[in-house]
Image (cartoon, helix red, strand yellow):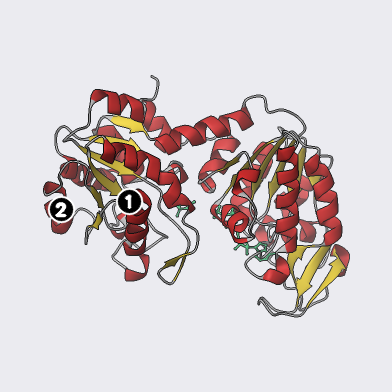
Amino acid sequence: MAVQTLDDLLNAGVEGRAVLVRSDLNVPLDGDRITDPGRILASAPTLKALAEAGAKVIVTAHLGRPKGEPDPQYSLAPVAVKLAEVLGRNVQLAGDVVGQDALARAEGLTDGDVLLLENIRFDPRETSKDEAERTKLAKALVELVGDDGAFVSDGFGVVHRAQASVYEVAKLLPHYAGKLVDAEIEVLGKLTEEPERPYAVVLGGSKVSDKLAVIEALAPKVDTLVIGGGMYYTFLAAQGVSVGNSLCEESMIDTCKALLEQYADVIHIPQDVVIADSFSADAESKIVSVLEIPDGWMGLDIGPQSVRRFAAILTSAKTVFWNGPMGVFEFEKFAAGTKGVAEAIIEATGKGAYSVVGGGDSAAAVRQLGLPEDGFSHISTGGGASLEYLEGKELPGIAVLEG
Ligand SMILES: Nc1ncnc2c1ncn2[C@@H]1O[C@H](COP(=O)(O)OP(=O)(O)OP(=O)(O)O)[C@@H](O)[C@H]1O
Ligand SMILES: O=C(O)[C@H](O)COP(=O)(O)O
């Protein structure tokens, strides 16, 4: 069955109806300052359309990974303030998830009002492994919208999670894909259905264990797989080279070795790196060959020679997907690799390539390094979700909308 969209819901009429929207408002924070509001901005069109059409909008979302109980550092309070500013309308924040305050506020909503529920992960049932527990929470969410309520799934960044507010709740209410989910699926679809070649994928970031499955799935499908960032050092260790104090996941070394052997023609890795004597913004640093990382030093960025080689590959690509920074871009000294690779992708895009940036950190890097967001064809709000989509895995939050 085809997925129903927000337009279908708007056409059916929402005036006076309560609509529950699952958004992904998981933004990076420094204290209570939002350092990158990208996901809030991307969630706004669906919420605005519903409020303008006269729905009583109830938004549920998570922030970080709290341990199933209220924790002030993960409160959605700063998000509510920013969301109100972006929507240009008042946004109430419930003091709980589905408790008395949420219920009272939901009952008091008038047409066009927006209510944000407190962090859904404050309730342990959201991420419970027990389906019955998740269903109980989903039922409590349904109670907030009442009998003629509807559910709009718009948190693309969480559609790979079979959690109560993403999956179970969709089974209990008439369900629709929001504008963001719709747009993300269309864009990522272009990368899986006959992408124009050469097709290059750039992977970086810190966690090799999270991305090995993606490498295994993508390597046979792409022309070039560029690997940088913290995850690269496990590949370097797999070549029997000393990595000093660089990030390295010992248990992954054998898999990395096998991948390097099987996909020798596809995988490209750095030849030089920027090393530091400590993990800090003002660490002493130097550029060395990857074969010469001294004991006690750590690789925090790819070197200039590698940037030039990667740029040559990327500027001639016709399709590019990039996930994960090439180095610790948060420290100025180690941002050049990420910037160089991003600029090469922007150049390729200017020459007609189709480019997608996926992952919260890569998108934040683009904005933090002052690069033009419109230099890329699309900046996805999904980190893990976009990777799992490209891997060809079924995304529970999408599959459930088809039923
Ligand atoms: N050489 C390195 N050593 C240590 N950390 C690194 C290195 N290179 C990059 N990083 C760090 O990796 C982090 C990003 O890793 P992550 O795997 O979470 O990226 P992402 O895929 O863009 O994000 P997400 O999927 O979580 O949205 C950044 O904070 C960056 O500083
Ligand atoms: O940051 C993300 O990728 C999404 O918000 C999902 O968060 P999670 O990985 O904690 O489920």
In the displayed image of the protein, which residue is found farthest to the top? 1
Instruction: Using the numbered discs, state the Cα–Cα distance from disc 1 to disc 2 in whole angstroms.
Output: 20 Å
Residue 189, quarter of the rendered image: top right
Q: Say left or right for 78 vs 264.
A: left
Find out whether the residues at labels 1 and 2 contact each other: C-beta distance under 8 Å.
no
Specify the label residue 80 is tagged with: none
Q: Position of residue 370 (x, y in %)?
A: 63, 58
The residue depicted at 37 percent of the width and 70 percent of the height is 73
Residue 270 visible to the viewer: no
Give the secondary structure at mark 1: loop
Q: Position of residue 51 (x, y in %)?
A: 27, 41
Specify the label residue 105 is tagged with: 2
The residue depicted at 40 percent of the width and 37 percent of the height is 397
Residue under numbered circle 1? 88
Q: Say left or right for 345 vs 190.
A: right
Would you call the spot at circle 2 few (<14 residues within 10 Å), some (14-19), or many (20 or more)? some
Residue 206, quarter of the rendered image: bottom right
Type of amino acid under label 2: Arg
- Looking at the rendering, the quadrant in which ligand 1 lies is bottom right
Q: Say left or right for 360 vs 21.
A: right
Give the secondary structure at mark 2: helix
Count of numbered marks: 2
Residue 209, quarter of the rendered image: bottom right
The residue depicted at 78 percent of the width and 43 percent of the height is 314
